[in-house]
Amino acid sequence: MRKRLLATLLVAGFSGYVLGGFWRFTEEVDRLSKPVPSADADAIVVLTGGAMRLDYGLDLLRSGRGRRLLISGVHPGTTAATLARLTKTDEAWFDCCVDIDYVAADTVGNAEMAGRWAERRGYRDLILVTSDYHMPRSLLEFDRISGIRSITPVAVRRADLWSRDSLPSGSGLKLLMTEYGKFVATRIRGFLGMAPQDAATSSHVASLDRP
């Protein structure tokens, strides 16, 4: 009986810890997606994979919040002309001030490639643009990149994830739970000192004026 009681208490405690952690994670995602005070940086990094991320990044570039923009994780073959057309942006912006990373295939790779790009150009303060649910894990990955002094998060709010009073919708709850699992795994990996596998050995960062 004592062993059963102890096991029950351990399971209940662990479940409470997990649920509490998920609730705090959800609150953090909601907080990050709220407007933040204006802050400039050396450059801007946009992680592809979500609607409106690139639009946000280009708006920041045009408003002078950073001197240059890196779009990380772009599908090979995507051209400046395609992105300019999709975002309704003058191609001159891509010619002068935008770089593209075709190598990164995940968040770990995004951070690695952004770090190499920033080091090559002498940037230490970055603005990071990604979706709200993806921002906490992205910040963990970027925090381990040496040479980057500060990261200012600009989270793109996924309206379909939220219902009234900033509570997750049905579909949003499923996505947030999946992302929370990845977030916890990233924290555990960092706590154990396990080096993530690099997305690629190449340090190639191509200009957007190439296919």
Image (cartoon, rainbow, N blue to C red):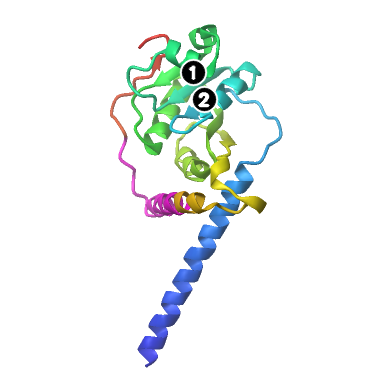
Mark 2: secondary structure: helix
Question: Image quarter for residue 181?
Answer: bottom left
When the figure is inspected, residue 202 is found, relative to residue 107, above or below; the finding is: above
The answer to whether residue 198 is left or right of residue 82 is left
The residues bearing labels 1 and 2 have C-alpha atoms spaced at a distance of 10 Å
What amino acid type should be assigned to the residue bearing mark 2? Leu
| Highlighted range, magenta | 176-198
> Which residue is identified by label 1?
86
Quadrant including the C terminus: top left
Asked if the residues shown at circle 1 and circle 2 are in contact, with their CB atoms under 8 angstroms apart, the answer is: yes
Which residue shows up at 37% across the image and 33% down it? Answer: 109
Q: As drawn, is 73 to the left or to the right of 140?
A: left
Whole-percent x, y for residue 100 in the image: 42, 19
| Residue named by callout 2 | 54
Q: Nearer the viewer, mark 1 or mark 2?
A: 1
x and y, in percent, of residue 167 in the image: 60, 54
Q: Residue at x 39, y 24 (%)?
A: 74
Q: Earlier in the sequence, mark 1 or mark 2?
A: 2
